[in-house]
Image (tube, rainbow, N blue to C red):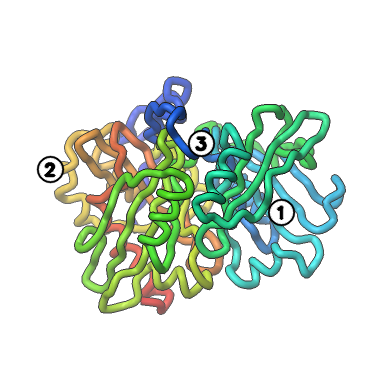
Amino acid sequence: MTQTARKGSAHEAPPLSASDISADTLIGAIPHNDAGDPFPVIGMDHVRFYVGNAKQAAHYYSSAFGMTCVAYRGPETGSREVTEYVLTSGKARFRITGEVRAGSPVGASVAAHGDGVVDLAIEVPDVDKAVEHAREQGAVVLREPADLQDDHGTVRVAAIAAYGDTRHTLIDRSRYDGPFLPGFAPAGPLFRAKPAHHPARYFQAVDHCVGNVERMDEWVAYYNRVMGFTNLKEFIGEDIATEYSALMSKVVASGNHRVKFPINEPAAGRKKSQIDEYLEFYGGPGVQHLALATNDIVASVHAMREMGVEFLETPDTYYDTLGEWVGETRVPVQTLRELRILADRDEDGYLLQIFTKPVQDRPTVFFELIERHGSLGFGKGNFKALFEAIEREQARRGNL
């Protein structure tokens, strides 16, 4: 395995100042007029995980992903069925939920799917208007609009169904100044202070959330119709294919591009694709990976590797001609090679990205770190190298 570059290496790129880069810039958001939007959104509110042990999962994301615990609810706060930890990194917010007593929906979900993402919660300016439009367009409303209140104010919430057991909670927190939601108490860090040479944050926002489904076009049409999302990108045919497997993907996005959902489905191939593997082990459609926007991917990869996060390996041959087609980037090719970071360029600019291995026992959910420099894409030029790397891991698991 290639050794990563040391802190202070001559190949290191100069760090970027997080204070000079907005979250909208990091995730490629664009100006948008909500006036004619039937389902306007503010952005991603939080990502909710159901897990077998919330305390241990929260500790992992705190230590390995550098997140900060800001809120908690459990038996000590009056929650008798579940324990929850809320962790943040910039505008990214994870809600980690585990059951306290057997027989809860949390436990049933973990038994069926393993640890996974159950809710891609979206902040909206008007919950009732959003639900009304969604219902008119055929969405299943899982939770009618209701107010949650405590001494910090009022939060309006509702929820609609998405693919598989995934849901979208819709949240208006404009009248609330508490740590997360009513019922949650402020909480302190779960992990010792980060090492001094680590960045203050490893990532600053959720860039996009990828879903694996069996009928991609059906769900693309759902987001077009129910949430007013537009089609941003499309990858079919030879775009995402290797010698053994293939998949198809279409990306839907809110008008402001603050919420982006690539939707994948398997395509015919000689062997089992990564989507087939996911659908088998997750037990149906669900969230495959979360892309986390960082302003300094080099520093983030250094820190996360040091804390035990495993990333996919990319062969040396990928980097032999990388500079010829990707051009000059903030990070020298030698540093990209040492850290196994991928690069891609399109008509708008370039991006840098790297993918973790699955972060739980089942080969399901994993993460991406992405650093955008103008590019609004998803690394099309890297698809072959990425999916060949995933296939090598599938083969090691005996699932290819």
Numbered disc in front, either 2 or 3: 3
> Which circle's residue, 1 or 2, is located before the other in the chain?
1
Numbered disc in front, either 1 or 3: 3
- Residue 197 is at least partly visible in this image: no
The relative height of residue 226 versus residue 274 in the rendered view (above or below) is above
Residue 324, numbered label: 2
The relative height of residue 238 versus residue 268 in the rendered view (above or below) is above
Query: Which quadrant of the figure has residue 214?
Result: bottom left
Q: Looking at the image, which residue is at 54% across and 45% down?
A: 65
The type of residue carrying mark 3 is Val
> Which circle's residue, 1 or 3, is located before the other in the chain?
3
The type of residue carrying mark 2 is Glu
- Report the Cα–Cα distance between label 1 and label 2: 47 Å
Horizontal side, residue 97 vs residue 263: left or right: right
- Between 383 and 7, the one lying in front of the other is 383
Horizontal side, residue 35 vs residue 273: left or right: right
Q: Looking at the image, which residue is at 74% across and 39% down?
A: 147
Residue 255: % across, % down: 41, 36
- Report the Cα–Cα distance between label 1 and label 3: 31 Å
Q: Which residue is mark 3?
A: 41
Q: Looking at the image, which residue is at 24% across and 65% down?
A: 241
